[in-house]
Amino acid sequence: MLSKKMTVSLTSLITIFALAFVVPSAMAQFEIKLSVGDADMSFADGNQVVYGSAITIKIMSTKVINFQGTDDAASGTDLGDDDFTVIAYNKLGGQVVSGAPTLGAISIDGTADGMHYMADLSSLAAPASDAAANVAITRVLVYLPKETVELADPRAELDGTTRKAAGKNKEASIELHYVAAAEGDAGPDAIPVGQPVVNKIERVGSELRPVTADTFEVLITLSEEPRKDGFKKDHIDVSHATAGDPTFLDMMMETRASAGTFTAGDLASSGRNMMLYRYIVVITPKYENKNDIVVKVKSFYDQEKMMPKMYMPPAANGYTEGMDQLTVKVGQEILKDKAAGLEVVIPKEIRIPASGWTVFAKNEGNSGIVNNPGNDKDEPKANERTPAQLKYNLVGLGGLPNLETFLANGGTIDLIGSGLYISEIMWGSD
């Protein structure tokens, strides 16, 4: 047994090791969170705010802090408007200096509890024209560097008389995406904001060739980002195949033949941010027949928070090939390039309906195929087949004609409404 003295020593040793792995104090810095409250008008990621509206930045600290409201260059420890950096970007990602918004004086938000503050961000005017939209401000970053603001309590988190890092704030930021205020206000030549549409459905890869692979991919371009929990494989309408869940590929600018002018074939956004959204969908053909595979999109809601808009598919005769519908030819053959006289094993997974095919086999007993007695449309009884056996319309060895005699006497073979699979032919008197 360990003595009491050794127990104390081991406890001390464990304590020393535990202290050695304590997370540095910088990891315990308090948080300051930035938000826009009800100004966010979209379910999309980030914060979508409207051009021309006054945006209030909510500032919430997890610890009590002091604030000055305006310039705080003297102390550098209280919350002030000069602690924040505001950076503006255009649609192409370039930084915009001229006309960038600024953050106003900070004030108390609600109760004076030392943790809730706010400041107004100056408003932005919408681009004067669509041609100017690419260089206008569309995104703004409001940024608070770490260790800019300190705790209000002068006794907290001190190392002598110097404030420890744990008594200072973590980095905080918020990004605002500016969007059109209402339909058609993004410029005189703009397409009015309206219901979402499917701009394009296209094959990825060999678009002109019939599909023969196990799977193929289609690229779907939408005029508006679907709500995050709404655009799934259940919203892909596909015939004679199955679809996987759409995978978001990228967001791209709408296309125009010239600045400010849409023409036939251009891809136009119906959303407020005038962007297009592309998704990859994996399609798995069934190959149970030679029917074309047709891919469409079912209805979905856009990201609008207040009054979401819905994409409604057109009537049955209203689809446009290559836009809201894609038709893919099927090129795979179940049976390929079989030379004359070659015996073919029919795989169990290939089902040949009794009323649709005639199968000739040299050995009925070993073929794995059950000949249905009587009416060939009837299902075989349980004692007439095994679970692995399939139902075929079979002509066994005894039914094979002497084709030499048959054809010499004027006989013909007519295939009406059925296919023919011949695994072996007995020709002539032998």
Image (spheres, rainbow, N blue to C red):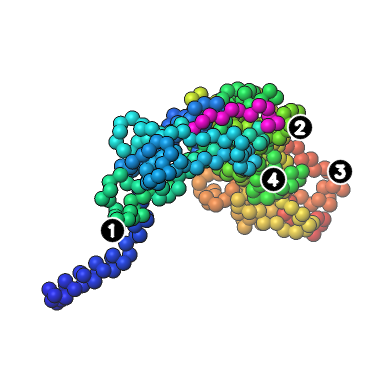
Name the front one of labels 1 and 2. Answer: 1
Name the front one of labels 3 and 1. Answer: 1
Q: Which residue is mark 2?
A: 258
User: Under tag 2, what secondary structure?
Assistant: loop
Residue 249 is tagged as none
Disc 3 residue type (three-letter): Gly
Residue 315 placement (x, y as % from top left): 65, 23
Name the front one of labels 2 and 3. Answer: 2
Q: CA distance from mark 3 to mark 4?
A: 53 Å
| Count of numbered marks | 4
Q: CA distance from mark 2 to mark 3?
A: 72 Å
Name the front one of labels 3 and 4. Answer: 4
Circles 1 and 2: CB atoms closer than 8 Å: no
Instruction: Please give the range of residues in magenta.
Output: 121-132
Residue 410 is tagged as 3
Q: Which residue is mark 4?
A: 204
**Where 111 falls versus 346 (above or below)?**
above
Name the front one of labels 2 and 4. Answer: 2
Disc 1 residue type (three-letter): Gly
User: Under tag 4, what secondary structure?
Assistant: loop
